[in-house]
Image (tube, rainbow, N blue to C red):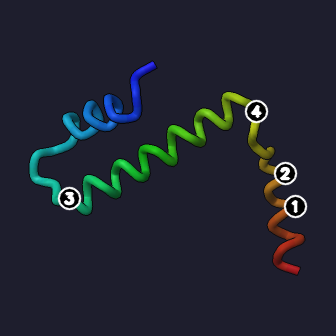
């Protein structure tokens, strides 16, 4: 498994050349969130749609 640094370098190399540093940081942030979510799903750490809807209803009361 590649290190975080190697993953970031690979990801940055794939981005368009004309991005500013803020856009690169944002894209790295979003990519990290997506990868963490994928890992959580793989490990079974997620809720069903019905559970999420029930939790939302309880919070909105």
- Mark 4 or mark 1: which comes first in sequence? 4
- Labelled disc at residue 13: none
19 to the left or right of 26: left
Write down the residue under mark 3: 21
22 to the left or right of 49: left
- Whether label 4 touches label 1, CB < 8 Å: no
- Whether label 2 touches label 1, CB < 8 Å: yes
Residue that appears at 58% across and 35% down: 38
Write down the residue under mark 1: 54
Disc 4/disc 2 C-alpha distance (Å): 16 Å
Residue that appears at 21% across and 42% down: 15
Write down the residue under mark 4: 44
- Mark 2 or mark 3: which comes first in sequence? 3
Q: Nearer the viewer, mark 3 or mark 1?
A: 3
Q: Residues within 10 Å of mark 3 (few under 14, many from 20)?
A: few
Q: Nearer the viewer, residue 49 or 44?
A: 44
- Whether label 4 touches label 2, CB < 8 Å: no
Q: Nearer the viewer, residue 42 or 49?
A: 42
Write down the residue under mark 2: 50
Disc 3/disc 1 C-alpha distance (Å): 40 Å
- Whether label 3 touches label 1, CB < 8 Å: no
SS label for mark 1: helix
């Amino acid at each position: 498994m590649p290190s975080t640094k190697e993953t970031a370098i690979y990801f940055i190399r794939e981005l368009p050349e004309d991005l500013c540093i803020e856009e690169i940081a944002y894209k790295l942030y979003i990519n990290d969130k997506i990868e963490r979510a994928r890992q959580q799903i793989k490990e079974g750490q997620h809720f069903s749609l019905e559970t999420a809807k029930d939790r939302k209803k309880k919070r909105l009361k």
